[in-house]
Image: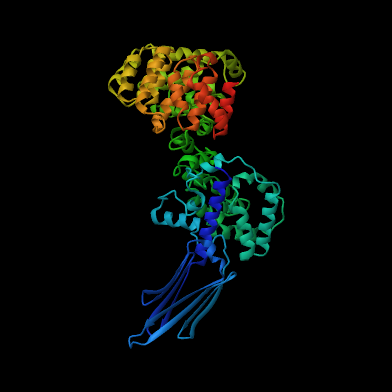
Amino acid sequence: MGFKEEFKREMRNIQNDVAKEVEKYWVLDFEGHKIEIINEMLEEVLKVDGEIIAQNVRKSIWSHILPFSTLKGTFHSSSGKKHKVFVKIGGFVKLNVTVKVDGKELLHDAMKLQFLPWSNKEFIVPYIEQQFHANQKLITKDLPDDAFLYDEFHPKHAPGFADQLHTEEVTPFYTKKLIKLFLEQINNPTDETRKATYEKIKDEKVISYYYEFLEQFSGIEKEESRVKEEAIWLLEHAAHREVVKFALVILGTGNCEELKERLKIIALHEEFTGVALFALTNGTTSSNEAVWYIAKNVTGWGKLEALNFLDATNEDIRQWILLEGLKDTVPGNASALICANKGKLDIELHESAISEKVFQGAGTIILALLYEGSYQTMDDYEYAGQVLMRYTYHAKTHCRTLKQFYILTQIHEYLQYDEETWDDRFSTNWKPHEKRAVEENIEDIAKNPEYLQQAIDTLNHGVEDEDYAIATAQYYHADITNIMFEKIKANPENYKYYMALFTAENEQIIEQLIKFTDSFGDFNDLTENQKMVVLVLLEELDQYDGAGLKFLIKTLKTADYHLQYIAMQTLCRYNKSSWQGTEIEQLALRYAKEAKDKDVKEIAKQLLA
């Protein structure tokens, strides 16, 4: 997304705001006749008794540069008398309208065009509250300002995700200026002062100045009651989500006990869970039960925020965190680390015997901690060694299903890191005897041939649990080559089948896998699944110097910049002699000079260097 797209969005929003502000309607009575005047951004209409007698239509908003427009028309009364209607509409600062019939003035009105940023829009918090009171839950995650934020260049995110993505800080002195404007609003609450604050808030993400704002605002003397009044005003009149968040942050800096129930409702929308819980936990007393209620009723990024705020103050909450905390939260392991620590997973597993429920819950948390995502990994968990030792010990009693054995295969993979990695682990959260115990526990369990048999049966006959079956077969070093090829023939778009064969490290197998992509066409109209297959093959090819050149040429010829880039990344690891003098070199020369994507152009130059 560039400046051009951002400018288009801003112009679209300005145009929409102006259109709503100038949209007016007047209705008059003249001797029993209904006269209607409709003023819109690109049109003025004059109706008498439902019939259009005059109309102005514009092709562009810039035609409003003319200060006034007129509408003229005639109609006949029931007696047959002809009447002339004249309407004059316009003005820059005020919208003036004059209506005359037969030269007699029926209406002269003038209204100031204020263009307040919250006017002519639906307010967000009342919208959320109305949903909740009608249904005792939120039935949609849409918000009234979605149209303001999203278009073809700005895809809609899951609620709360945009704040996780945001890394840009506000410009210098932004926070200081915002505080100054808000203090002016507090001391003199008018449309003008509120508009100044509102405009400053709505176009910057609160998360980008949150900590700086709290630090500066807390050191200022102010009348708390007036601060709260204006925060509530913003909360109730906010038509933009960042204004809602700002108001919640302000409420969290003082006592807002009387707003506790409202804050609970707002927190149920994942876009506002984090800031609403900040206000709830900082501005009200005994809030942990309310936080738990919210944690049980939100999903995704909202649940992650709720887990952060939730304290395991009693056994019921601790058990819920341990057994239910990861349900419906975001993939990855930020949530898993919270659940492991707050649920006291290490203490739970140190019991001599545990329930099936605890074993299942522990496995879910451990699997998430092992996930190689962009968040915390198992290595960040203080009790990693103890927990995996005790979990694999309990697995001797509880492990029965393929999914449960799959978790053991992932623990086994985690153990396969190099000596340097283990030196780091032994200096932080592991002891050598714990590692040996985990290895021995898994080996003892794996002596049971039932798991391999389950895996082969699943791959031959089932569709469910295939991921678990593949991982189990690979743990046992079972040859599933023929089974996987049969599956690829039946479903050549499942990239996991291809990856299952990569472990063979056989160039002939890779070449055979590449042939299956012939059915994908010229790679210019790939489905998402087909593209994933092409990508995993490209990444695997870098281990086989000179292999798959026709496949690489086909990939380079596609219009997809991402595929072009990955293909050239692969070629950078090949010996140049394998592709020099071929069509690959010609394509690289062309992209080095003419590629529209700067990353593609740069890597093409590197390839030729």
Place of residue 596 in the rendered image (x, y in percent of width and height, measured from the top left): 54, 35
Res 468 → quadrant: top left
**Is residue 361 shown above or below 278?**
above
Q: Nearer the viewer, residue 465 or 148?
A: 148
Q: Nearer the viewer, residue 420 or 509?
A: 509
Image colouring: rainbow
| Number of numbered callouts drawn | 0
Q: Please give left or right for residue 512 compared with residue 174 in the image.
A: left
Place of residue 269 in the rendered image (x, y in percent of width and height, measured from the top left): 48, 48
- Quarter the N terminus occupies: top right
Q: Please give left or right for residue 582 compared with residue 223 in the image.
A: left
Q: Please give left or right for residue 50 compared with residue 312 in the image.
A: left
Residue 480 in view of the camera? no
Place of residue 374 in the rendered image (x, y in percent of width and height, measured from the top left): 54, 30
- Quarter the C terminus occupies: top right
Place of residue 553 in the rendered image (x, y in percent of width and height, measured from the top left): 46, 23
The residue under the point 49% across, 24% down is: 567
Res 198 → quadrant: bottom right
The residue under the point 53% across, 44% down is: 288
Q: Nearer the viewer, residue 93 or 241?
A: 93
**Is residue 184 shown above or below 334?**
below
The residue under the point 43% across, 54% down is: 132
The residue under the point 57% across, 43% down is: 2
**Is residue 111 shown above or below 269?**
below
Question: Which residue is situated farthest in the left direction here?
Answer: 461
**Is residue 143 shown above or below 1?**
below
Residue 81 in view of the camera? yes
